[in-house]
């Protein structure tokens, strides 16, 4: 009798109907996709310049910017960008962050990294000050076009 019940259950199909399973999977995929999209938006956007910071941009100069790329023993490209940032304005800045955008040969962005030129490690910058900086990046994707990445100031915080 027990075997007859098992055979009847097999013939009747699964306990949960296929449409319910399909809807559950669709809901799970949609929810996962939404959270993935949100995390991508948050990581790529980051803080945006305030009106006050945008108005101060012309007062900050990046000078003597140079790039050096070397291959390490693992055959990965290590990139360092050096230069100076100069505060030609009338305010003390506590934080200046840049985004470095690496591109492939057709100009398509393949990597974006944020780095602080002025911040907790380096101290603030008073009006008229200049600070040397060195930004190190590793590894850069193989598709990189080997040219200087685009640097743009993405955040400024004042004293």
Image: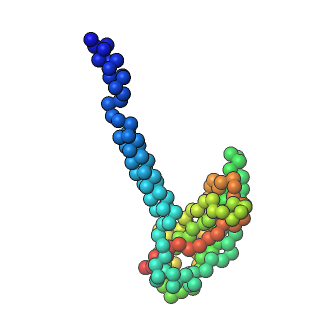
Relative to 28, is 155 above or below?
A: below
Q: Is residue 16 visible?
A: yes
Residue 4 placement (x, y as % from top left): 30, 14
State the quadrant of the C terminus.
Answer: bottom left
Is 30 or 89 nearer to us in this picture? 30
Looking at this rendering, what residue extends furthest in the bottom direction? Answer: 90
128 or 20, which is in the foreground?
20
How far across and down, in percent of the image, does residue 94 sit?
Answer: 47, 75
Residue 28 visible in the snapshot: no
Residue 115 is situated, as x and y percent measured from the top left of the image, at 55, 65
Rendered position, 144 above or below 29: below
Which is more toward the observer, 139 or 72? 139
Residue at image coords 72%, 52%? 71
In the visual, does 75 lie left or right of 92? right
Q: Quadrant of residue 67?
A: bottom right
Q: Quadrant of residue 10?
A: top left
Quarter in which the N terminus is drawn: top left
């Amino acid at each position: 009798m027990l075997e007859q019940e098992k055979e009847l259950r097999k013939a009747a199909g699964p306990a949960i109907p296929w449409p319910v399973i399909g809807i559950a999977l669709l809901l799970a995929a949609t929810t996962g996709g939404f959270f993935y999209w949100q995390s991508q938006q948050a990581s790529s956007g980051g803080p945006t310049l305030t009106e006050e910071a945008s108005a101060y941009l012309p007062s900050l100069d990046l000078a003597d910017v140079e790039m050096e790329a070397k291959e390490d023993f693992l055959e990965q490209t290590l990139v360092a960008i050096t230069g100076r940032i100069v505060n030609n304005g009338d305010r003390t800045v506590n934080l200046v962050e840049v985004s470095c955008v690496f591109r492939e040969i057709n100009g398509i962005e393949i990597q974006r990294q944020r780095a602080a030129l002025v911040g907790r490690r380096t101290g603030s910058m008073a009006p008229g000050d200049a600070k040397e900086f060195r930004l190190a990046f590793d590894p850069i994707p193989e598709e990189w076009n080997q040219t200087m990445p685009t640097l743009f100031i993405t955040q400024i915080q004042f004293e």
